Structures are given as structure tokens and as C-alpha cells.
Image: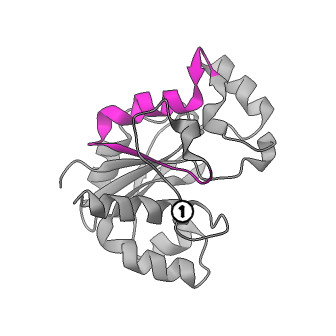
Amino acid sequence: MKQPLGVILAGGQATRMGGGDKGLLPLGGSTILDHVIARLEPQVAAIMINANGDASRFSRHPFPVVADSIPGFAGPLSGVLAGLDWAATQHADHIVTAAADTPFLPCDLVPRLLLAGEANGLALAASPSGRQPTFGLWPVALRDPLRAALQDGLRKVVQFTRAHHAATAEFPDDAAFFNVNTPQDLATAKAML
């Protein structure tokens, strides 16, 4: 399996944070997104940011910014589809997705997902607290079934991945998937840093 492309999912509305981009919030002299990039970039062949709205807000990063093709903030699966469509233009076989608000994501995320997904190329991360559905290995070959499922109204990552026999990559630490959803979470992330 070739090294996958990385897709950072930043397409949410951040309602619990009062709107805006959680990934662009300051954390330890940079931004949450900078921390995500620093951990993901060494593990993938290239990076794309999935975000809706004005792409110029990410202009200090040298990565393409691709919006959802499914209208109306259809959730993480819509970002996965945007990533798969982008990966197809790059002649890639797989993408690995990561959330833009998780500054401590595992430095071995991609190798563990690749190992888990050897059978059919589809795997989700899990930690002791449960599945981490925004962290997954996705084959580009699933883009048409995913598009059809989204057009039929499916929004749940686990529902789609279960139907396509996703494997699970187990990670020992919940802290690696800590995500910043609220101002209190941001304070916790600063303490964790």
C-alpha cells in the first residue's frame, strides 16, 4: 500500500466554541492546527485541509483547501468524501483523516491504521473510551458508495464504516484524541501542552 494522503477535517461549525475555526485558536505559541499538521505531515505523502467558507483564512499553510461537495454541513463524512475526491485527482489509493481540533493526535496514527486496514483498506481508530470516527484510513475506491450514502441522507461515520467492514486500530491512550470543543477544553489543552 502506498503512503496515504492526509486530510485534516476542519469543516465543522464550532458551535460550542461560539463559531469560527477551532483549529486556528492559539495553543502554545502556534495554533491547534499547527500542532495537528506537525504530527500528521511526517506520516503522509501530502496534506489537504477540508474546510467550508473562505479558504483564504488558511493561506499561511501551503496546502490545498477543499470544501464539502455535499451542501449544508453534512458532517465528517462529507469531509471524507471531499478528501477522497481530492485524492482521486492525485492518483492516490487511500487517505487518512484527522480532526483539526486534536493537537495531540498519535505520532503513529498512520502506521497503525495501515496495519489494521490491510484486509480491505478501511479502518477507524479507537481508544479506551471508544471509536474515534474522525480518524480513519479510507480507500479512494469507496468514494462513489460514500457519495450515494450521503445523498441518501446518511450522516453517521460508524454506520457507513460498519456496512463496509471497517477494521479497528486500537490506541492505548485517550489523551491522544483529546479535542478542543469548548473554551474549557482549550484551557485543558494548554495545561496538557
Going 73% across and 32% down the picture, which residue do you hit? 185
In the image, farthest residue toward the top: 29
Label 1's element? Answer: loop
Up/down of 164 relative to 86, above or below: below
Residue 91 percent coordinates (x, y) = 22, 60
Residue 45 percent coordinates (x, y) = 26, 42
Residue 10 percent coordinates (x, y) = 57, 47
Going 47% across and 39% down the picture, which residue do you hit? 172
Say what amino acid the circle numbered 1 marks.
Asp
Looking at the image, can residue 174 be seen? no
Please indicate whether residue 7 sits to the left or right of residue 191 in the image: left
Up/down of 106 relative to 157, above or below: above
Residue tagged by mark 1? 68
Task: Give whichever of 48, 77 is nearer the camera.
Answer: 48
**Quarter of the image holding residue 187?**
top right
Q: Quadrant of the C terminus?
A: top right
Going 50% across and 28% down the picture, which residue do you hit? 34
Marker count (numbered): 1
Looking at the image, can residue 114 be seen? yes
Boundaries of the magenta span: 27-53
Up/down of 191 relative to 111, above or below: above
Going 52% across and 68% down the picture, which residue do you hit? 69
Query: What's the coloring here?
Result: one colour
- Residue 156 forms part of the magenta stretch: no
Task: Give whichever of 128, 192 is nearer the camera.
Answer: 192
Up/down of 5 relative to 35, above or below: below
Residue 189 percent coordinates (x, y) = 66, 25
